Image (spheres, rainbow, N blue to C red):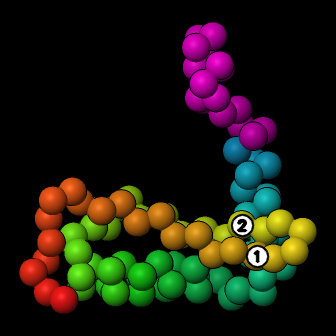
Amino acid sequence: MSWLDRLLGRNETSGQVAKQRLQMVLIHDRADLPPGLLEKIKDDIIQVIAKHTAIDTANVLVHLEQDTHENRLIAEVPLLAGRRNGRG
């Protein structure tokens, strides 16, 4: 890994990846979501938004974040620039 990669935070170590995965497991546990529910929510979000505009469905990300006061469901939906489905 080059110094530039380290400076920009690229190429995470396996320890960092494991820590992130553990955090996600803990967040899912605390939010009391059954397995697979987040994937179903993601599919529903894709269907609804795709009815109104063109999106990059392969790169949609849905995840949970937690702070001391609340849990948040975060959906990152990349739009395809300049294209619409013609509906809505």
Give the secondary structure at mark 2.
strand
What residue is at 81 percent from the left and 76 percent from the top?
A: 70
Q: Residues within 10 Å of mark 2 (few under 14, many from 20)?
A: some
Q: In this view, does 14 lie to the left or right of 59?
A: right
Say which residue label 2 marks.
Answer: 65
The residue segment tinted magenta is 1-16
Q: Do tag 2 and tag 1 residues touch (Cβ < 8 Å)?
A: yes
Give the secondary structure at mark 1.
strand
Q: What residue type is labelled 1?
A: Asn
- Magenta span has 29? no
C-alpha distance separating marks 2 and 1: 6 Å
Q: Residue 45 occupies which quadrant of the picture?
A: bottom left
Residue 71 circle label: 1
> Residue 64 appears at what percent x and percent y?
67, 70
What residue is at 71 percent from the left and 66 percent from the top?
A: 65
Residue 29 in view in this figure: no
